[in-house]
Image (cartoon, rainbow, N blue to C red):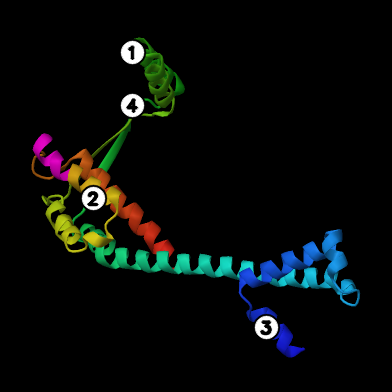
């Protein structure tokens, strides 16, 4: 009896599922039920239930194992990205300090309604007007400005150096933000310690992603 239970426990899912289906069909379909010897017919319901239970347990185990492997893989990747990218990048801002301020240009609903109405009047095409006006209703028009303190400059060159040494761990958002920050130097031409909007967005991404990856890596 122990050997039978051990065999059921170790049987692959397709064997258990097929056995459960076969037992159910032989039990419920009259022509097939008649073929089964009369001695074994009373055991068909029990066999169906047992095979279904073992098949369900094996399926649950397979799903749980797959989820566990996926989480472990994501955790390892998060640890690598933290170690190779985001911790070194975050460390740059412990040596150089950035001061920022924000201005909300449309703080009240009436301001956002006015913006939406203006877009409805100026945009072409019903679809474009509707989409632009809908976005304007939720856009508070937050304008951020920032600069490096104590005469330092934004460490973009060092960030690019860290990135170039670990490109296989870089996400698309980080790559795009670094390119935009690099391009902003030629387009905005910041003075001295001034920080461009693209550089500020890059710094915000570094802090946010560092926090998210730290939480993921420590699960």
Give the CA distance from mark 2 to mark 4. 30 Å
Q: Position of residue 203 (x, y in %)?
A: 26, 50
Structural crowding at the residue carrying mark 4, measured as other residues with C-alpha within 10 Å and reported as few (<14), some (14–19) or many (≥20):
few
Going from N to C along the chain, the mark reached first, 3 or 2, is 3
Mark positioned earlier in the residue sequence (2 or 4): 4
Q: Which type of secondary structure does the marked residue at label 4 adopt? A: loop
Identify which residue, 3 or 107, lies in the foreground.
3
Q: CA distance from mark 1 to mark 4?
A: 25 Å
Q: What range of the chain is rendered magenta?
A: 181-188
- Kindly tell me whether residue 217 is visible in this rendering: no
Residue at the extreme top of the image, as rendered = 121
Between marks 2 and 4 in the image, the one whose residue lies nearer the viewer:
2
Quadrant location of residue 23?
bottom right
- Are the two marked residues, 2 and 1, in contact with CB atoms closer than 8 angstroms? no
The residue indicated by pointer 2 is 175
Q: Residue at x 15, y 50 (%)?
A: 154
* Element carrying mark 2: helix
- Kind of element beneath mark 3: helix
Which residue is labeled 4 in the image? 105
Q: Is residue 67 placed above or below 184 in the rendered structure?
A: below
Say if the magenta span includes residue 16: no
At x 22%, y 57%, the residue is: 93
Which residue is label 1 attached to? 124
Q: Give the quarter of the figure containing the N terminus.
A: bottom right
Q: Residue at the location (23% across, 50% down)?
A: 175
Identify residue for label 3.
7
């Amino acid at each position: 009896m122990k050997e039978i239970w051990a065999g059921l426990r170790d049987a692959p899912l397709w064997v258990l599922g097929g056995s459960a289906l076969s037992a159910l069909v032989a039990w419920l379909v009259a022509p097939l039920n008649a073929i089964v010897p009369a001695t074994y017919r009373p055991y068909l319901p029990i066999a169906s239930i047992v095979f279904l239970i073992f098949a369900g347990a094996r399926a649950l185990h397979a799903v749980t194992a797959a989820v566990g492997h996926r989480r472990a893989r994501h955790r390892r990747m998060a640890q690598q990205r933290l170690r190779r990218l985001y911790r070194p990048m975050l460390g740059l801002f412990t040596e150089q300090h950035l001061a920022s301020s924000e201005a909300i240009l449309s703080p009240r609903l009436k301001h956002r309604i006015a913006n939406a109405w203006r877009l409805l009047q100026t945009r072409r095409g019903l679809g474009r007007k509707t989409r632009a006006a809908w976005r304007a209703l939720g856009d508070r028009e937050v304008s951020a400005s920032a600069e490096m303190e104590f005469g330092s400059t934004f460490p973009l060159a060092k960030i690019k150096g860290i990135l170039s040494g670990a490109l296989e761990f870089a996400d698309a958002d980080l790559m795009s933000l670094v390119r935009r920050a690099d391009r902003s130097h030629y387009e905005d031409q910041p003075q001295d310690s001034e920080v461009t909007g693209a550089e500020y967005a890059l710094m915000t991404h570094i802090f946010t992603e560092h926090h998210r990856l730290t939480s993921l890596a420590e699960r």
